[in-house]
Image (cartoon, rainbow, N blue to C red):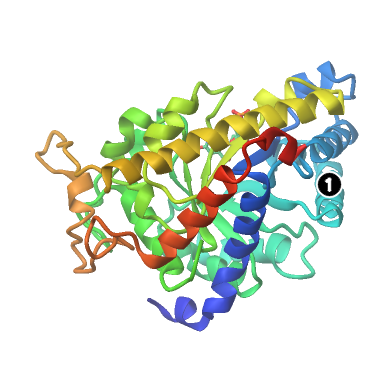
Amino acid sequence: MNNTEAQTSIVQRSEFGKRLKASMDLYGPLCVGIDPHRKLLAKWGYNVDAQGAELFAMRMLQAAQGRAAAVKFQMPMFERYGSKGFAALERALFAARQMGVITIVDCLRGGLPTTVSALADAYLKPDAPMLADAITLLPYYGFRSLTNLVGDALENGRGVFIASVTSNTEGISLQSAIRQRGDFPGQTVAYGVAHAAQNFNDGVEGMGSVGLIIGATIGQWMKTSGVDPSVFTGPILSPGYGWQGAEAKDLKTVFKGTKGNVLVTVSRSISSKGPEISDLAMATESIALDVRQALYEAMEENDKEGVPEPPTHTDNDGHDPALSAANLADGHPPVSTPSTPHQLHPQQVTQHQSYNRFLISDPNRRSRII
Ligand SMILES: O=C(O)c1cc(=O)[nH]c(=O)n1[C@@H]1O[C@H](COP(=O)(O)O)[C@@H](O)[C@H]1O
C-alpha cells in the first residue's frame, strides 16, 4: 500500500461504501441512468438543449427517488451544451442531494496524475460545484495515475468506479491484453485494475468505496478477462442490462457468487418509457425487482456450489489469466479470497446474510419499494 492509501483512514475509506450499501439494502441493487439522449428529449417534447436535458434529469430523478439505490448522470450528454449543460448538471446534482439520492457522475475520465487530480475539485471536495457521491474513471494511463484522485475521493467520504471490463465487446480486446511489465506482469489489464482497486478496499468492514465497472453483457468473456467479481469487496457498477441486450440470466452468470455488492445501472430501458413520471416509476420498479431477483439467485448459486469455479480458460499462449489471478507475480495472495475457498470471510457472510434477510423477509416485495 502506498502513502496515499496508508494516509486515508479506514473510516474515510468506508464512508461511500457504507452509504451506498445502506441504500442498496433499502431499495435494491438498481441505479437509474440519467442519459438525456437527444432522441429522447425530442420524444418527451423537450427542446434538444441544456434546458431540455435538465427537465429530463429532474423527471428521471423523481422516478428514481425511493425506488432505486442511486442515479448515474451521463456527463457528456450535458457537456455537449457547453457552460449551460454544466449548469444544468450542477442544478440536477443539487436537486438529487436535496432529495437524498446517491449520485454518480459518469465522467469516465483518466489522465496524468496532476491533470486528473483537478477532478476532485470539480466533483468530490465539499465545495465542489458538481458535488457527487462518486465518479467513474478510466485507468488506461496506468492505475497509479488515479491514486491521488482516489485518495481525494476517499478523504472526502466519496467513491469512484473504475472501468475494468466494459459492456462493449470491443473493450475486451484491450482489457484482456496481458501486461508486459509493471505491477502485474503476465496478468490481464482488467485483472490489474481489479486488484489495484481491491487494495483500497482491503481492511474495510463491509463494502468498500472503490468500485469497478463490469458490464453485464460480457458473460462469455468473463474468464478471458481474468477478473473474478465474487472476490471483489467494493461496489460493482454493471451497465448493459436491458437496452444493450443483457438479461437476468447474464447477471446470474457474470455475478455468480457476489455478495450483494453489484449495482446494475439501467438507462434507456427506463427512460424510453417516459415522459410520464408514473410510467417511468413503473418501469423502474419492475426492473428493480428483476435485477434484485437475478442477483439474489446469483448469490444463491454460489451457496449451492460453495466456491467460484476454478478457471479453465487457456489463451493462445497457454497462459491461464484467471488461474494466474490466484498466483500473483507480485507475491501477494489473491485479493480478498477466503483463506479456504469453502469459507466466506466473516464480513462477506454478514453482507450476504443481511441481503438475504431483506429479500426473504419481504414476500410482497413490490409493495415495499413503491
Ligand atoms: O461508465 C458507464 O457507466 C458505462 C460503462 C460501460 O462499460 N458500458 C456502459 O454502457 N456504460 C454507461 O452505462 C449506461 C448504459 O445505458 P443503457 O444502455 O441505456 O442502459 C450509459 O450511460 C453508458 O455510457
How many discs appear?
1
Task: Name the amino acid type tagged 1.
Answer: Ala
- Left or right of 183? Residue 125 is right
- Which residue reaches farthest left? 318
Q: Quadrant of the N terminus?
A: bottom left
Percent across and percent down for residue 303 are: 34, 45
Quarter of the figure with residue 348: bottom left
191 to 256, vertically: above or below: below
Quarter of the figure with residue 336: bottom left
Residue at (56% x, 70% y) in the render: 14
- Left or right of 343? Residue 5 is right
Q: Nearer the viewer, residue 116 or 348?
A: 348
Q: Is residue 248 visible in the rendered structure shown here? A: yes
Residue at (85% x, 44% y) in the render: 88
Ligand 1, by image quadrant, is top right
Task: Determine crowd level at label 1: few under 14, some 14-19, many 20+ residues with C-alpha closer than 10 A.
Answer: many
260 to 63, vertically: above or below: below
Q: Is residue 111 visible in the rendered structure shown here? A: no
Residue at (60% x, 57% y) in the render: 21
Q: Quadrant of the C terminus?
A: top right
Residue at (62% x, 33% y) in the render: 289
- Which residue reaches farthest top? 43
- Say what secondary structure mark 1 lies in: helix
Q: Nearer the viewer, residue 112 or 293?
A: 293
Percent across and percent down for residue 294 are: 49, 33
Percent across and percent down for residue 128 are: 77, 65
Mark 1 C-beta to ligand 1 under 8 Å: no
- Left or right of 232? Residue 151 is right
Percent across and percent down for residue 180 are: 22, 53
Q: Nearer the viewer, residue 330 or 292?
A: 292
173 to 191, vertically: above or below: above
Which residue is the site of mark 1? 92
